[in-house]
Amino acid sequence: MAQSSPPPFDPTRPPLIEGFTPTAFQDTEDGFRNKFLRKTRENPLVPLGCLATAGVLTYGLICFKKGNTRQSQMMMRARILAQGFTVAALMVGVVVTALKPQK
């Protein structure tokens, strides 16, 4: 029995892989805004921590520019605390999501 030769290479078509059927990704969300709002409702502490980090960083840079080095150093330490809070909130969110029963 003669084996059939492979089809000629066509650069306009993706390669065929045996046992693999590609499907187009379809986003069920309406976009960034809806996804952001949903994620914020699921774990509101993460955006709060991000805002706190950005605010403390901004104020610390303003103090640094004005020459108030002591206040600037305190704000940089506070920034580290705010970042730690944000990372902890992320980790708690991951654990809660993992423990939540699947539908």
Image (cartoon, rainbow, N blue to C red):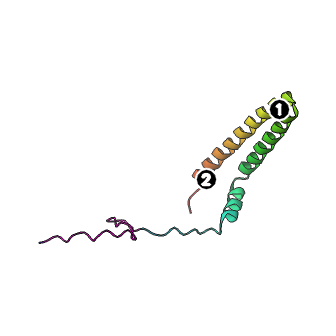
Residue located farthest toward the left when viewing the structure as drawn: 1
- Which quarter of the image is occupied by the C terminus? bottom right
Q: Secondary structure at mark 1?
A: helix
* Sooner in the amino-acid sequence: mark 2 or mark 1: 1
Q: Which mark is drawn over residue 97? A: 2
Name the residue located 87 percent from the left edge and 30 percent from the top edge. Answer: 68
User: How many C-alpha atoms fall within 10 Å of the one at disc 2: few (<14), some, or many (≥20)?
Assistant: few
Asked if residue 42 lies left or right of residue 76, the reply is: left
Asked if residue 103 lies left or right of residue 52, the reply is: left
Magenta-span inclusion, residue 10 = yes
Identity, as a three-letter code, of the amino acid under mark 2 = Thr
- Which quarter of the image is occupied by the N terminus? bottom left
58 in relation to 47, above or below = above
Residue located farthest toward the top when viewing the structure as drawn: 70
| Image position, residue 23 (x, y; %) | 45, 69
User: How many C-alpha atoms fall within 10 Å of the one at disc 1: few (<14), some, or many (≥20)?
Assistant: many
Asked which quadrant contains residue 58, the reply is: top right
Q: Which mark is drawn over residue 30? A: none
Magenta-span inclusion, residue 15 = yes
Query: Disc count in the image?
Result: 2
- The secondary structure that most of the magenta stretch takes on is loop
39 or 31, which lies in front?
Answer: 31
44 or 31, which lies in front?
Answer: 31
Asked which quadrant contains residue 62, the reply is: top right
| Image position, residue 29 (x, y; %) | 62, 68
| Image position, residue 80 (x, y; %) | 73, 35
Asked if residue 59 lies left or right of residue 85, the reply is: right
**What segment is highlighted magenta in the picture?**
2-21
Cα separation, mark 2 vs mark 1, equals 37 Å
26 in relation to 57, above or below = below
Identity, as a three-letter code, of the amino acid under mark 1 = Ser
Q: Look at mark 1 in the image and give the residue it sits on.
A: 72
